[in-house]
Image (tube, helix red, strand yellow):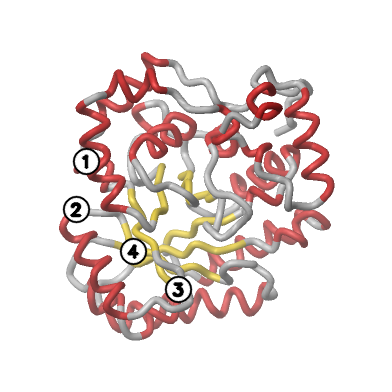
Amino acid sequence: MEKKNTIRTPLVEFSKEKMKEIIQDFTPERIATFLDVTDLSADTQAPKITKMVDWAKTYNCASICVNPVEGSDILPSLLKGTKIKECYVIDFPLGKVDISTKSKIAAHTVKRSREIRGDGKGMIELDMVINVGRFKKDPEYTLEEINAVCDASDGEHVKVIIRSSELTVAELYKVSEIVSISNADFIKNSTGMDAYGATPEHIRIMREVVGPDMGVKAAGGISEAMTAMRLIYAGAAEKPLQTPELFRLGTSKPLTIISSMQWLKYATEDWIDAGVIPCTICPFNNTSKLRVELREESNRYCSECKFKEYRKHKEF
């Protein structure tokens, strides 16, 4: 899919009626089913994973997302006999190992987890990170590495992390197109450790390209319900897309999202009327520490944005 020729205003304006409709369709119990409860820190230990599993069991969350090493002796045993899926990141967070090694990690993770859990296929998800540098040079490489991990996963779900903060708009369209023709099940924007996390604009583009039959996962900086609703607005506005099979939210703050959903439903009009300062959810406001081509593109978009006065006066 080709990038639009005209520079468009990022997705920072939300139809009040549509947003109200989406919020009314969700409850704390329902939003919980969309959550991949996540902890990918280097110092994560068993007590924290046990607590995450307790949260997921209590609120019926979609999955627990951790590093693969936790699959060797912790997570499969804790989730055995439940419907909650194990989610493991592959080649996290940089995506820089070669295809063969990436595939072997995926295959080993699936095999080991199945042996311990003993619940059969369909209980594992792999969130793989693409090699962004290789993609910029050779997009065909990206399709090859995605499909190699899908093959190694032996039928388990694969989500593709594209690290969208490091991509130009044209590259975001291109990589989303590659994911859409791959054997993967989901496209995901971020590791949560990139320059910035989920923005409505990136989620909108990803959904636009992959269409209604592939899953979209938003991750990075999602810590309360209104942020979650804006991302659902961008990537799953229509009711058929509002299912955990087609949309997910990766978060390390599941309880805050679930509890704030109740407040959001209680005072929906007030939350919507409060709005949001556009620059705070715009990807072009977060590129100062990225490569020069991304900074230059950001400046072009900002110079033509009708909300540029916010940036000029730094009213956020």
Q: 302 above or below 41? A: above
* Contact between labelled residues 1 and 2, with CB atoms less than 8 Å apart: yes
Q: Residues within 10 Å of mark 2 (few under 14, many from 20)?
A: some
Q: Position of residue 208 (x, y in %)?
A: 57, 32
Q: Secondary structure at mark 4?
A: strand
Q: Which numbered dot is residue 44?
A: none
Depth check, front residue: 169 or 283: 283
Circle 1 sits on which residue? 28
Please state if 208 lies on the left or on the right of 86 as rendered.
right
Q: Which mark is residue 64?
A: 4
Which tag, 2 or 1, sits closer to the chain's start?
1
Q: Indicate which label's residue lies in the foreground, 3 or 1.
A: 1
> Dot 2 corresponds to which residue?
59
Label 3, on which residue?
67
Q: Quadrant of residue 76?
A: bottom left
Q: Disc 3 vs disc 2: Cβ atoms closer than 8 Å?
A: no
Q: Earlier in the sequence, mark 2 or mark 4?
A: 2
